[in-house]
Image: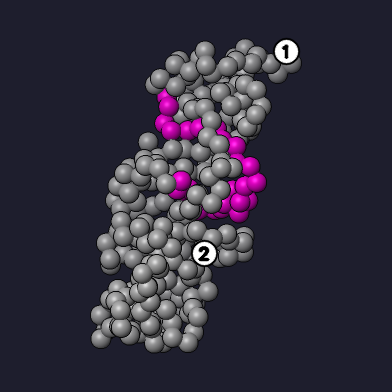
């Protein structure tokens, strides 16, 4: 934990300090070694919130992008259940930063508990298995309403750069599908309708994030986040896609919007 109560005031850990947990009232000991993130730990109880995970430097850097009053905020449900959110914005959006793996049961429990929640997942542990491919026209654009895309797979010739067929050229779905390479059509398809959408291939994916009911943003340490999405196509099917969202835009949205679906809506 980053904060504990010292003389009833929220304080960050400093060498030699003792504090009180604002949730369970237990004694907290400051941990301030040279090679660890300075934090508070329960003196006897390992953790009073079963959803809490050990904080890394990645967690701390993200949390410090938000005002202190928005970090480590206790949320009490109507039935008295209490959990400590990593961040709760001024407008009531909850943010959970997740580095370690998570099972479906815990993920779903958090989503039901916080409701207006977004996940930010540390992508560095699986960065070599996540491949971002060609751009896509915005699914709401006119050009996208005529296209059906083949799923991109690493090493599958053509799909990495983009392959699709047009409903208008094959309306009854009985004639031979027309395959086109977006290298020849990239400008006409994306020039006026690109909104950050891309196909990708995630080798050995962490399946729970693909099934999340709240938005999932993956942080690969770049100046952008990768949001997991489903992209509707002209034949009423969908493919898994991502949307690239600049971190600056994400932070502007999440601190000014009230609802999770408004974030990154270009």
Q: Which residue is mark 2?
A: 110
Q: For the magenta stretch, what is the residue range?
A: 193-220
> How far across and down, in percent of the image, does residue 219 sit?
45, 48
Determine which quarter of the picture holds residue 130: top right
Residue displayed at 44% across by 60% down: 96
- 232 vs 248: above or below: above
Residue displayed at 52% across by 64% down: 110
Decide which of 55, 78 is in the foreground and name it: 55
Decide which of 188, 236 is in the foreground and name it: 188
Mark-to-mark CA distance, 1 and 2: 48 Å
Q: Decide if residue 140 is in sight here.
A: no
Of tags 1 and 2, the one toward the viewer is 2
Secondary structure at numbered mark 2? helix
> How far across and down, in percent of the image, does residue 168 sit?
59, 14
Q: Which residue is mark 1?
A: 175
Residue 200 lies in the magenta-colored region: yes
């Amino acid at each position: 934990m980053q904060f504990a109560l010292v003389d009833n005031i929220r304080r960050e850990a400093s060498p030699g300090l003792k504090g009180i947990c604002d949730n369970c009232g237990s004694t907290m000991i400051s941990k301030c070694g040279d090679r660890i993130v300075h934090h508070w730990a329960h003196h006897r109880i390992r953790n009073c919130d079963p959803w809490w995970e050990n904080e890394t430097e990645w967690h701390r850097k993200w949390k410090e992008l938000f005002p202190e009053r928005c970090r480590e905020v206790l949320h009490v449900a109507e039935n008295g259940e209490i959990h400590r959110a990593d961040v709760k914005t001024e407008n009531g959006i909850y943010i959970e930063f997740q580095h370690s793996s998570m099972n479906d049961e815990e993920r779903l429990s958090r989503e039901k508990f916080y409701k207006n929640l977004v996940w930010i997942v540390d992508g560095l542990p699986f960065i070599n298995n996540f491949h971002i491919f060609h751009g896509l026209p915005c699914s709401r654009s006119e050009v996208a309403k005529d296209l059906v895309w083949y799923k991109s797979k690493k090493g599958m010739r053509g799909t990495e750069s983009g392959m699709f067929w047009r409903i208008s050229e094959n309306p009854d779905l009985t004639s031979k599908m027309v395959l086109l390479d977006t290298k020849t059509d990239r400008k006409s398809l994306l020039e006026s309708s690109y909104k950050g959408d891309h196909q990708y291939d995630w080798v050995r994916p962490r399946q729970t994030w693909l099934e999340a009911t709240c938005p999932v943003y993956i942080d690969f340490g770049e100046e952008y986040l990768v949001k997991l999405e489903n992209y509707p196509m002209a034949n009423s099917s969908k493919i898994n896609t991502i949307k690239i969202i600049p971190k600056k835009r994400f932070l502007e949205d999440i601190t000014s919007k009230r609802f999770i679906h408004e974030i990154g809506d270009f």
